[in-house]
Amino acid sequence: MKYIFYLLFPLLTFAQEKAILVTYKAIYNTELPTTKDGYLYINNNQKKTVYFTENINKTDEEKDENVDITVRLSSEKKGFNYFDYENDSLITRDDIFKESQLIKEKTPDFNWNLTEEKKIINDITLLKATCYFRGRNYIAWYSTSTPIKAGPWKFQGLPGLIYEIYDETRRYNWLLQKVESSTYDFNSEYLNYKNFETITIKEYAELKFNNKNLDKKLFAKLPRGAKIVSQKSFRTGFEIKFEWEEETKEED
């Protein structure tokens, strides 16, 4: 892969906020395989970052009534991950059964394990790091050749820019495509959450995975006449096990 770098500007203080834009290719090898473009905006002093992806293209579902059907419920609102490091906060917009939710949590600790393993791509030395986060084991390749310290989705905390990261099953993959100078309004209404209700990460997990109305809402979205041959009740997504659940398991 050839990484594309445009002119990176030094830290500046303009009224019009300037930013660095890092573009990733996000490849999700899920039940409905999807490839998306991910956009990471980083402000001048790296105190704020915003990450979002392009809308998922709808996939035609099988018309055979005797096959399993995967239903995707969306509010049509664009999701994002917004870090405000000065306030030690992460705001995420995500959908739960077609309802858009704003989730507020403290900056997650990935507890990275930095290794001495390296690889060189296009004359750029990448270092390997690993971590376990909310139910998945991740492998990251990052570079310290630029002053940028960030990554896609919620990934952060490494001493460099993440070029590639994936979970050990290769279900979720992010690959850096290019880095360029840009602008971004970090005070836009799009990111405004202070005037809206937020939920905690624990409330989010409860709504997503322990919602008693799940079956009712899913069945309501199925095509007329469709039959369920088998229903899987496993957790899926980036986050499938949370800190308090791990703590409870240890106590048991």
Image (cartoon, rainbow, N blue to C red):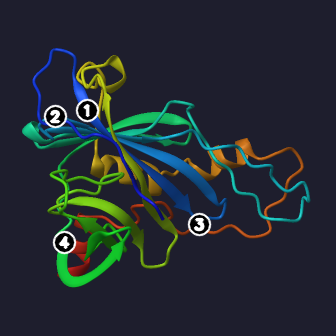
Q: Is residue 9 positioned above or below 173 on the image?
A: above
User: Where's residue 186, x and y in %?
Assistant: 25, 26
Q: Disc 2 marks which residue?
A: 44
* Circle 3: residue type: Asn
Q: What amino acid type should be assigned to the residue bearing mark 4?
A: Trp
Cα distance, mark 4 to mark 3?
24 Å
Q: Residues within 10 Å of mark 2 (few under 14, many from 20)?
A: some
Q: Which residue is mark 4?
A: 112
Which residue is under mark 3? 29
CA distance for labels 1 and 4:
26 Å
Q: Nearer the viewer, mark 1 or mark 3?
A: 1
- Labels 2 and 4: the sequence-earlier one: 2
**Image quadrant in which you'd find residue 121:** bottom left
Q: Amino acid at mark 1?
A: Ala
> Is residue 75 something one can see in this rendering?
yes
Task: Choose the circle earlier in sequence order: 1 or 4.
Answer: 1
Mark on residue 19?
A: 1
- State whether residue 210 appears in this view: no
Lower sequence index among marks 4 and 3: 3
Judge by depth and name the residue closer to the eye, 183 or 125. Answer: 125
First of labels 2, 1 by sequence position: 1
Q: CA distance from mark 2 to mark 4?
A: 25 Å
Residue at 45% across / 46% down in the picture? Answer: 38
